[in-house]
Image (cartoon, grey):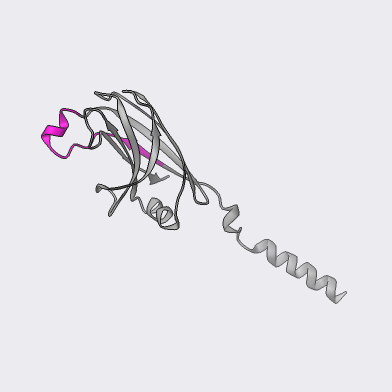
């Protein structure tokens, strides 16, 4: 009888524990893609708009977005890390982008623990480059929703 009571108590305590990290719910992030010229010369080559959403499940980030209105076809898209939210930073991962003036951005990326922390702290953003704006045409910070 005592052993049955101990097993029942142990099972009840296990049910009260929080779920393990493998059972964590996915987190959603979103960003608006917009031109961010650094000077007047860049402003004339940049145009467009778009949006992106990202789902973080464990350490996998799935990105889906759309853009339109570029003055020239997109060439590359990357995930960048900034030192602080809203500041430019270095590229860390490639994102697939349609090579057109309108299209989609997609990715399924495996993030390091540091990159997960950067994402959760608003330091990761998507940057789309185009033929006429090779230093970047559209930027969009991925912020928690």
The image quadrant that residue 46 belongs to is top left
Residue in the image at 84% along x and 70% along y: 4
Can you say which quadrant of the picture contains the N terminus?
bottom right
Compared to residue 136, the image places residue 56 above or below, namely: below
Q: Residue at x 82, y 72 (%)?
A: 5
As drawn, is 137 to the left or to the right of 57?
A: left
Decide whether residue 57 is among the magenta residues.
no
Instruction: Give the residue displayed 38% in from the left and 27% down from the top.
Output: 98
Q: Is residue 136 visible?
A: yes
On-image quarter of the C terminus:
top left
The verdict on residue 32 being magenta is yes
The outermost residue toward the bottom is: 2
Q: In this orientation, which residue lies closer to the viewer: 101 or 69?
A: 101
Rendered view: 58 above or below 99: below
Q: Which quadrant of the structure image shows residue 104?
A: top left
Residue 121 locus on image (x, y percent): 37, 54
Q: Nearer the viewer, residue 110 or 23?
A: 110
Percent across and percent down for residue 108 are 48, 40
Residue 50 is left or right of residue 21, and the answer is left
The magenta stretch is 30-45
């Amino acid at each position: 009888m005592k052993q049955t009571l101990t097993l029942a108590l142990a099972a009840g305590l296990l049910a009260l524990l929080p779920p393990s990290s493998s059972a964590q719910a996915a987190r959603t992030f979103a960003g608006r893609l917009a031109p961010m010229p650094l000077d007047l010369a860049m402003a004339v080559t940049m145009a467009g708009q778009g949006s992106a959403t990202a789902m973080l499940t464990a350490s996998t980030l799935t990105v889906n977005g759309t853009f339109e209105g570029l003055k020239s076809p997109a060439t590359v898209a990357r995930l960048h890390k900034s030192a602080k939210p809203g500041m430019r930073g270095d590229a860390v991962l490639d994102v697939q982008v349609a090579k057109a003036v309108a299209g989609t951005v997609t990715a399924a990326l495996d993030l390091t623990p540091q990159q997960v922390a950067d994402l959760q702290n608003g330091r990761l953003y998507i940057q789309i480059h185009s033929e006429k704006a090779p230093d970047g045409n559209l930027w969009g910070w991925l912020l928690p929703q």
